[in-house]
């Protein structure tokens, strides 16, 4: 075992347009404390390359919390201080920021290459020697997770759905001789290394070569499909495209939706937080109404983040059931530098064109549900539509008819059940997370019908009490895949024709994941958009 002393280093690759003759342009001046500049001739003969932020020692805050209760009030003199170090290294005509302590906050965010650490790790890690992953999952809520295993394992051990998970960071064991042991990569690359100070430029050169390699595509190609955008300059450009669309009225690829799951039975409608006397609550937030109330020429990103969408209580119109920034409610798709970008829930995401096309092509292969469903009426809630639609097609409305499972929960079988065994799940269109809830309901119902005999018995009992003619639509035995079809019906006012069912990209992505899951277990899937008129 090596006994060489190691140093913890955190590397950030700086963008290629950095002016190497003015390295201090990458340093973020601290709000508090003193910044010291130090020249290291080994790294650069004329420029300062080490920046140290020092703060005076102060008693820790917790000392005051406990001190008044100490017998005799006698406490030792205790002080704490934080330190921040930033070392700038030029290598292969590129610049790195190597940080120590809290030095990360001395680097200007817009100067950082955001996928550097992730790609270095993926290009050098043994794919069977992964220790932990950081991921973001798009579901009913956007979930951030860190998953670790007790011993190094392949990526499959982490149960990531690569069609819906964004890989944000990874820790694993490197195969590269110059990166021994475990390394962690996200925007930065963190390592414990025996490399001595004079060899830092040489190590930096090797890191650039590793970053540019394409070896990651053999096992981790999916990371190119979609990425959360973190580059401030790119986000600024995207926000400008958003403002241009709002001001010009080119809003085909834009709509507003509450960015979380809400109980629409408790909401009478939504309104904006300003000029309330000039508009009544509407069933859904509307970009057109926002533009009519707020002069588009005066709209700024700051204004979009201050204005609110408010949900009015159905029981007491003077009360709110929640409010959200207009910016967070915008779902917008635009193309920038050949990539599709999606704004959802206040965050921008970059989507590769080929990935977008593959998702859309798959969704177009899902057959439509042609059973004669009626149009939806603007203002109808899901319950009213389900009752009317069930009557129109001679089906049974099961909306809010709960069935006990073999566990502690009670769930809906579906919203509408046909005599031929089509289990129809209906949802008013909101943002992608709302529809992902719809797709999860369909999967959950199918899994219970296939694997939970207690649920089958209870479902037949519930259906029998409502209408015995439909009992035969519920299988009597488990795993009766040929007896079950799942249909997703989306109530929408969208008039988009350029995407399947008029859905934004994240909704298509969730639909693809759900359909693949059901098809893999042998269940027929249908989908239909029902327009509100």
Image (cartoon, rainbow, N blue to C red):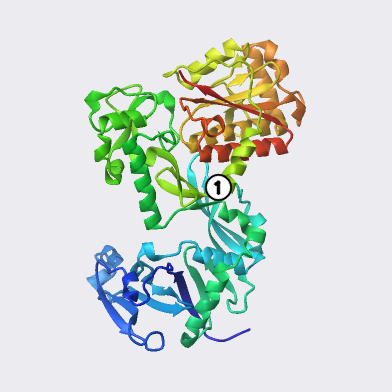
Q: Residue at x 39, y 77 (%)?
A: 88
Q: Looking at the picture, how far across and down is residue 21, in whole percent?
A: 34, 77
Q: Position of residue 264 (x, y in %)?
A: 43, 26
- Judged left or right of residue 474, residue 3 is left
The mark total stands at: 1
At x 31%, y 68%, the residue is 28
Q: Quadrant of the C terminus?
A: top left
Q: Image height check: is 91 above or below 111?
A: below
Q: Horizontal and vertical percent for residue 77?
A: 26, 77
Q: Nearer the viewer, residue 45 or 69?
A: 45
Is 203 in front, or is 276?
Answer: 203
Tag 1, which secondary structure?
helix
Q: Is residue 144 left or right of residue 461?
A: left
Say which quarter of the image contains residue 241: top left
What's the residue at 57%, 32% (across, down)? 500
**Res 276 quadrant in image:** top left
Residue 180 percent across, percent down from the top left: 59, 77
The residue positioned 57% from the left and 41% from the top of the image is: 509
Q: Find disc 1 in the rendering and name its residue.
A: 353
Relative vertical location of residue 149 with respect to residue 166 in this rendering, above or below: below
Residue 514 visible (yes or no): no
Residue 249 vs residue 155: left or right?
left
């Amino acid at each position: 075992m090596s006994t060489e002393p190691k140093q913890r280093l955190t590397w950030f690759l700086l963008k290629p347009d950095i002016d190497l003759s003015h390295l201090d342009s990458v340093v973020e001046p601290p709000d508090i404390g003193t910044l010291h500049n130090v020249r290291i001739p080994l790294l650069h003969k004329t420029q300062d390359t080490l920046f140290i932020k020092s703060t005076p020692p102060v008693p820790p805050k917790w000392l005051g919390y406990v001190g008044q209760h100490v017998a005799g009030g006698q406490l030792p003199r205790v002080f704490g201080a934080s330190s921040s170090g930033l070392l700038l290294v030029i290598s292969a005509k590129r610049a790195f920021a190597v940080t120590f302590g809290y030095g990360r906050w001395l680097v200007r965010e817009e100067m950082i290459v955001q996928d550097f650490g992730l790609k270095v790790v993926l290009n050098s890690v043994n794919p069977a020697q992964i220790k932990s992953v950081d991921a973001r999952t798009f579901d009913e809520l956007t979930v951030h997770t860190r998953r670790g295993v007790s011993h190094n394992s392949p990526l499959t051990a982490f149960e990531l759905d690569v069609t819906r998970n964004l890989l944000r960071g990874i820790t694993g064991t490197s195969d590269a001789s110059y990166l021994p042991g475990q390394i962690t990569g996200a925007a930065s690359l963190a390592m414990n290394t025996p490399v001595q100070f004079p060899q830092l430029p040489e190590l930096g050169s090797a890191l650039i070569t590793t970053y540019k390699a394409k070896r990651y595509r053999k096992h981790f190609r999916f990371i190119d499909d979609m990425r959360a955008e973190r580059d401030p300059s790119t986000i600024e450009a995207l926000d400008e495209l958003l403002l241009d669309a709002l001001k010009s009225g080119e809003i085909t690829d834009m709509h507003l939706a509450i960015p979380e799951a809400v109980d629409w039975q408790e909401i009478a409608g939504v309104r904006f937080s300003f000029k309330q006397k000039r508009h009544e609550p509407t069933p859904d937030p509307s970009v057109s109404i926002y533009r009519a109330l707020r002069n588009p020429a005066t709209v700024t990103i700051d204004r979009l983040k201050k204005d609110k969408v408010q949900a009015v209580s159905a029981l007491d119109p003077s009360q709110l059931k929640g409010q959200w920034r207009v910016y967070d409610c915008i779902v917008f798709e635009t193309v920038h530098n050949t990539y599709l970008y999606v704004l959802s829930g206040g965050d921008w995401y970059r989507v590769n064109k080929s990935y977008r096309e593959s998702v859309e092509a798959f969704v177009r292969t899902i057959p439509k549900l042609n059973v004669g469903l009626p149009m939806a009426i603007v203002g109808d809630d899901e319950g009213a539509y389900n009752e009317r639609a069930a009557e129109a097609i001679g089906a049974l409305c099961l909306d809010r008819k709960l069935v006990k499972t073999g566990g502690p929960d009670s769930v809906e079988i579906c919203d509408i059940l046909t005599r031929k065994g089509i289990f129809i799940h209906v949802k008013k269109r909101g943002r992608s997370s709302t529809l992902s809830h719809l797709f999860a309901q369909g999967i959950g119902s199918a899994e219970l019908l296939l694997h939970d005999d207690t649920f089958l018995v209870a479902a037949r009992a519930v259906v029998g009490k409502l209408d015995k003619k439909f009992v035969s639509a519920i299988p009597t035995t488990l795993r009766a895949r040929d007896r079950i079809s799942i249909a997703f019906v989306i109530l929408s006012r969208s008039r988009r024709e350029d995407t399947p069912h008029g859905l934004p990209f994240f909704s298509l992505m969730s639909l693809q994941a759900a359909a693949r899951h059901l098809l893999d277990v042998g269940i027929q899937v249908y989908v239909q958009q029902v327009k509100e008129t």
